[in-house]
Amino acid sequence: MQESAYSDRVSQAEGGLRERKKLQTRAALTEAALRLALAKGPDNVTVEEIAEAADVSVRTFFNYFPHKEHAILGRNPAHLERALELIATAPAEQSPLSTMSLIVHDVLRDLISEGALSRRGELIMGSPSLLYHLMLSSMDDERQLSEALTERIGDPLRARLIVTNAGAACRVAVEMHKDTPGSVPADLVDAAFQLLAQGLDPDYQKGSS
């Protein structure tokens, strides 16, 4: 029994160490990709250069990212996994928009802690290639989140509108933060979600002229 318990503790420790190393490797790759893209331009950076700057092999790079654009964008599948988990485990009394607000703030905290929010945003806005890959990945994320929210609330149209508008609110808040010195991204997100909750145009009338 004691040997079994000891083995379990060793396995847990080894698993924790592996996860920390994976996080460190991913962070090193995204930082190297962003740094090189800022210095040379995204189109002039190669996977080989990113891997060398992060002190890993090209094969290791492709264990984390399908192409250089995802590395420059800092795409992290853990964000989507956490978001899907938050939807699946949300309390019954929690509104869908409240759940999406928690998801957006969760991702935003990671982006801010990485210190690359404004630098990466400027780079993306100036690169058609990065914008294209961001659009594709965002559409796939929204599809999966919409499916998960549909399972919870049973209304696919409402689920899709909530998820899509939540993503738009986050993007607008980040863009406004870039253009408004001294602004706080989280506050802008809160203000955007409040507008969504209240209705952007309460006086809307179908077919009015």
Image: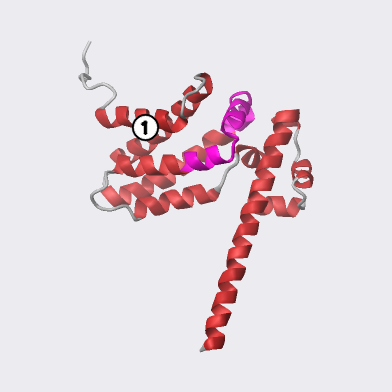
**Which residue is at the far top?**
209
The percent position of residue 47, horizontal first and vertical second, equals: 74, 43
Q: Quadrant of the C terminus?
A: top left
The percent position of residue 43, horizontal first and vertical second, equals: 72, 30
Left or right of 101? Residue 3 is right
Q: Nearer the viewer, residue 196 or 6?
A: 6
- Find residue 125 and report its image quarter: top right
Q: Nearer the viewer, residue 88 or 21?
A: 21
Q: Is residue 122 above or below residue 154?
A: above
SS label for mark 1: helix
Chain part drawn in magenta: 107-132
Left or right of 39? Residue 104 is left
**Three-letter amino acid code of the residue under disc 1:** Asp
- Find residue 117 and report its image quarter: top right
Determine if residue 169 is in view: no
The percent position of residue 28, horizontal first and vertical second, equals: 68, 47
Q: Is residue 84 above or below residue 169?
A: below
* Residue 158 within the segment the image draws in magenta: no
**Residue in view at x 47 percent, y 52 percent:** 81
Determine if residue 17 is in view: yes
Which residue corresponds to mark 1?
A: 190
The percent position of residue 49, horizontal first and vertical second, equals: 78, 41
Q: Dot 1, how many residues are within 10 Å of its Cα: few (below 14), some (14-19), or many (20+)? A: some
Q: How many marks?
A: 1
**Secondary structure predominantly adopted by residues drawn in magenta:** helix
**Which residue is at the far front?**
182
Left or right of 188? Residue 2 is right
* Residue 113 within the segment the image draws in magenta: yes
**Residue in view at x 73 percent, y 35 percent:** 36
